[in-house]
């Protein structure tokens, strides 16, 4: 029960296949109370049902492109708790055409949207979460992919967004470290979730990762859940600004 007595906000969860839900289960098993949010009511019904048996706080909808939505989310959080010991950040999005066309054809709009949802939202959330996290220190964890480090076919503008996200992790870690707030990212291997379906030829990527990875298997969302548990706990108290690969070792392979 390494998270007993701690409240952790997960922003956000889309349903039973989402990485956010796997993380919620890992954290909850170890005693955490989970405050959760979802993008729209389209996800709300399923997500609320998942959380029914858990010690949790439903914070309702939040579109991370809206400063107002983010501010109101933290107002609702403030009505329930005064402190947070952790924040898990999962939003990511890019337009379908930007994940299918040649990268050189990325539109200005598509670029802005992908970076706004997939990267800036982490900064915006950290800013609003700061008064809650600085009370007793805490851990912020976000999710990234190797497409932020290398050029991965069809990942395109999402790779650029993940590179910016990973850089933001380092800047936030440097900024918030003196307040005893750690900021890290998990670089996950391909997992069959809702977001993954948007990437063209995702299943080809999924199979290749399995064949080449040292562990010769794809990762499960629960592998990420348990790493998020470690990073959110005091066991990881000396780790910040880090990108931890949970990808069966795929990232170490050359040809
Ligand atoms: N699935 C994979 O193969 C994989 C691999 C590495 C990293 N990741 C990362 O894991 C994270 C979670 O993705 P997932 O695969 O679990 O899929 P997912 O679809 O469950 O998660 C993506 C989330 O982004 C949210 N989102 C998108 N636009 C939003 C907006 N405007 N406002 C609020 N929320 C918004 C969706 O509602 C959803 O909850 C993402 O950051 C993704 O890039 C996924």
Image (cartoon, helix red, strand yellow):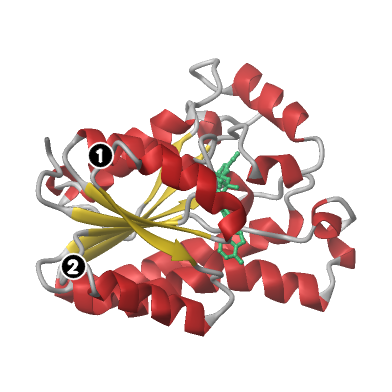
Identify the mark nearer the N-term, 2 or 1.
1
Residue 138, given in percent of the width and then of the height, sits at: 19, 62
Is mark 2 in CB contact (under 8 Å) with mark 1?
no
Please identify the quadrant where the N terminus is shown: top left
Task: Decide if residue 187 is in sight here.
Answer: no
Residue at figure coordinates x 61%, y 20% from the top left: 210
* Relative horizontal placement of residue 161, taking residue 152 as reference (left or right): left
**Residue where numbered disc 1 is placed:** 28
Q: Which of marks 2 and 1 is in front?
A: 2
Res 64 → quadrant: bottom right
**Residue where numbered disc 2 is placed:** 81
* Relative horizontal placement of residue 3, taking residue 172 as reference (left or right): left
Q: In this view, does 64 lie above or below 95?
A: below
Please identify the quadrant where the C terminus is shown: top right
Q: What kind of element bears circle 1? A: helix
Residue 76, given in percent of the width and then of the height, sits at: 32, 73
Q: Which of 14 and 137 lies nearest the eye of the viewer?
A: 14
Q: In this view, does 90 lie above or below 22?
A: below
């Amino acid at each position: 029960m390494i998270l007993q007595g701690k409240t952790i906000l997960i922003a956000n969860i889309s349903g039973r296949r989402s990485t956010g839900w796997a993380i919620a289960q890992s954290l909850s098993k170890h005693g955490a109370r989970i405050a959760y949010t979802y993008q729209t009511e389209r996800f709300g019904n399923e997500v609320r049902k998942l959380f029914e048996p858990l010690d949790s706080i439903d914070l309702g909808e939040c579109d991370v492109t809206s400063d107002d939505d983010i501010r109101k989310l933290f107002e609702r959080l403030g009505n329930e708790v005064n402190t947070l010991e952790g924040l898990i950040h999962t939003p990511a999005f890019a337009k379908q055409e930007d994940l299918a066309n040649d990268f050189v054809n990325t539109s200005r709009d598509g670029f802005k949207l992908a970076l706004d949802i997939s990267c800036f939202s982490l900064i915006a959330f950290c800013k609003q979460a700061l008064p809650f996290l600085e009370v007793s220190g805490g851990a912020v964890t976000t999710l990234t992919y190797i497409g932020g480090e290398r050029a991965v076919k069809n990942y395109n503008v999402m790779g650029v967004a993940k590179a910016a996200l990973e850089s933001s992790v380092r800047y936030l870690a440097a900024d918030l470290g003196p307040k005893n707030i750690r900021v890290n990212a998990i670089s996950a291997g391909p997992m069959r979730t809702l977001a993954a379906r948007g990437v063209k030829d995702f299943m080809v990527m999924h199979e290749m990762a399995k064949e080449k990875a040292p562990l010769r298997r794809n990762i499960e969302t629960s592998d990420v859940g348990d790493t998020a548990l470690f990073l959110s706990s005091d066991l990881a108290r000396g780790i910040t600004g880090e990108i931890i690969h949970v990808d069966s070792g795929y990232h170490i392979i050359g040809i």
